[in-house]
Amino acid sequence: MSEDTYKTIATPSEGIYTEKRSKFIAIALPVRTVEEVKAHLETYQKKYYDARHVCYAYMLGHERKDFRANDNGEPSGTAGKPILGQINSNELTDILIVVVRYFGGIKLGTSGLIVAYKAAAAEAIAAATVIEKTVDETVTVLFEYPFMNDVMRIVKEEEPELSEQSYDMDCRMTLRIRQSMMPRLRARLEKVETLRFEEE
């Protein structure tokens, strides 16, 4: 996998795993921020208010450094960790997996729980559409109107996403492009007369 791509899921998906009458419902959700994670957790805790446990794990950011696993009352390391393990072994990020457990009356023991949470999370991932996204960077440029054609030619050839533009005395444009392609885009833009980069 190249440095400037990462894998996540396109849309929410669900998986169900049953073991000794205990039912594990796993929901995998695409998320971008901790705020989104919290909002989803609140929703699912309300929706499955009658469930014994609502455990989860999430991973955020293309560098995959922001993550958390929560056992929600299950023995330590038997729920959140196996869920996170599935996220890791599939190299996913920007994902939250919630596993809801309805207790069936028969204890599964710690190893049984680990297997069940892992299997439920795996089911949800298997049902998901995994997509590869690029790590993008943005750059904002300012230039005088007569040089619009020069800038537009570069935009047309390099194909960055044009996220905003305004034309006053100075023209202003914000471009978004894959990280690995940014140096070339910048180098070409630098050659345009009057053009300057707006520092963040």
Image: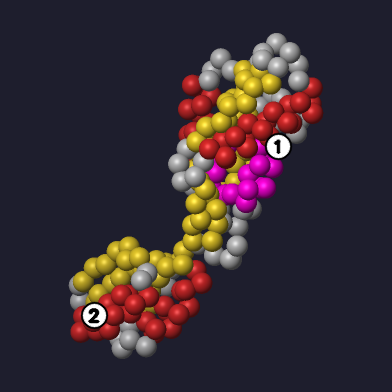
Residue 187 placement, left or right of 101: left
Crowding at label 2, few (<14), some or many (≥20) Cα neighbours within 10 Å? some
Residue at disc 2, secondary structure: helix
In the displayed structure, 12 sits above or below 143; it is above
Mark with earlier residue (1, 2): 1
Give percent across and percent down for residue 53: 63, 22
Residue that label 2 marks: 148
9 vs 144, nearest the viewer: 9
Residue occupied by mark 1: 82
Label 1 neighbour load within 10 Å: few <14, some 14-19, many 20+ = many
104 or 53: nearer the viewer = 104
- Residue 176 visible somewhere in the drawing: yes
169 left or right, relative to 47: left
Identify which amino acid the numbered label 2 is placed on: Met
* Residue farthest to the top, as pictured: 105
Q: Which mark is residue 53?
A: none
Relative vertical location of residue 179 with respect to residue 157 in this rendering, above or below: above
**Magenta residue span:** 81-97
Q: Residue at x 21, y 71 (%)?
A: 167
Q: Residue at x 56, y 35 (%)?
A: 124
Q: Could you tell me how far apart the alpha carbons at marks 1 and 2 are, in whole angstroms?
A: 54 Å
146 vs 98, left or right, is: left
Vertical placement of residue 34 versus 80, above or below: below
Q: Quadrant of residue 149?
A: bottom left
